[in-house]
Image (tube, grey):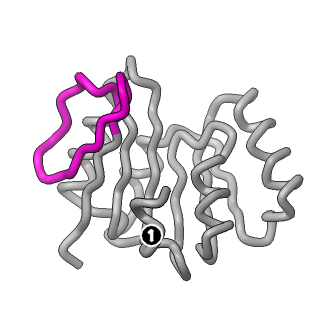
Amino acid sequence: MSILQLDLPEARVLDLYAGSGALGLEALSRGAVSADFVEKNPKSLRALEENIAALEAGGLSRVHRQSALAFAESLEPLSYDVAFADPPYTTGDAAKLAEHWKASPFSRVLSVEHEAKAAMPEGGVTRKYGSTAITFYRSGA
């Protein structure tokens, strides 16, 4: 999160594959003005909604119950300032999402967590943390 700290004040944030919502909620705590969370797993949705309520972030948050990749594919260019994605490693969605973003950047910044050994599309900056990596893409806009 510290890598993106200067991008977060006043940002419209998207948290794809949101899980508990940790990334989007942290972005709100660092000055983002709104966060949209996309999650389809019922257990994760319950935890996400409980976390939003516990942090009294309901007025700044929207939850979308659907496939994160399908949601991203439906977006207009630059719909968000910052997008986070932490897809399950076994699906290949990290690379698919980055490819879609490169073709139609739906945010100024995309941060995608993935297996360190996974091949990601060119154009991003990757930081490795053991067996995990995060690749950051930035639009020219």
Residue nearest the viewer, comparing 105 with 136: 136
The type of residue carrying mark 1 is Tyr
Residue 6 drawn at (x, y percent): 43, 75
Q: Is residue 106 magenta?
A: no
Specify whether 61 is left or right of 124.
right
Residue nearest the viewer, comparing 77 with 129: 129
Residue 23 drawn at (x, y percent): 58, 51
133 is higher (above) or lower (below) than 110: above
| Number of callouts | 1
The residue shown at (34%, 42%) is 134
Residue lying at the far left in this picture: please name it.
122
The residue shown at (37%, 44%) is 112
The part of the chain drawn in magenta is 114-133
Q: Secondary structure at mark 1?
A: strand
Q: Is residue 124 magenta?
A: yes
- Residue marked by disc 1: 80
The residue shown at (23%, 79%) is 141
The residue shown at (64%, 50%) is 64
Specify whether 77 is left or right of 33.
left
Specify whether 36 is left or right of 97.
right
Q: Residues within 10 Å of mark 1 (few under 14, many from 20)?
A: many
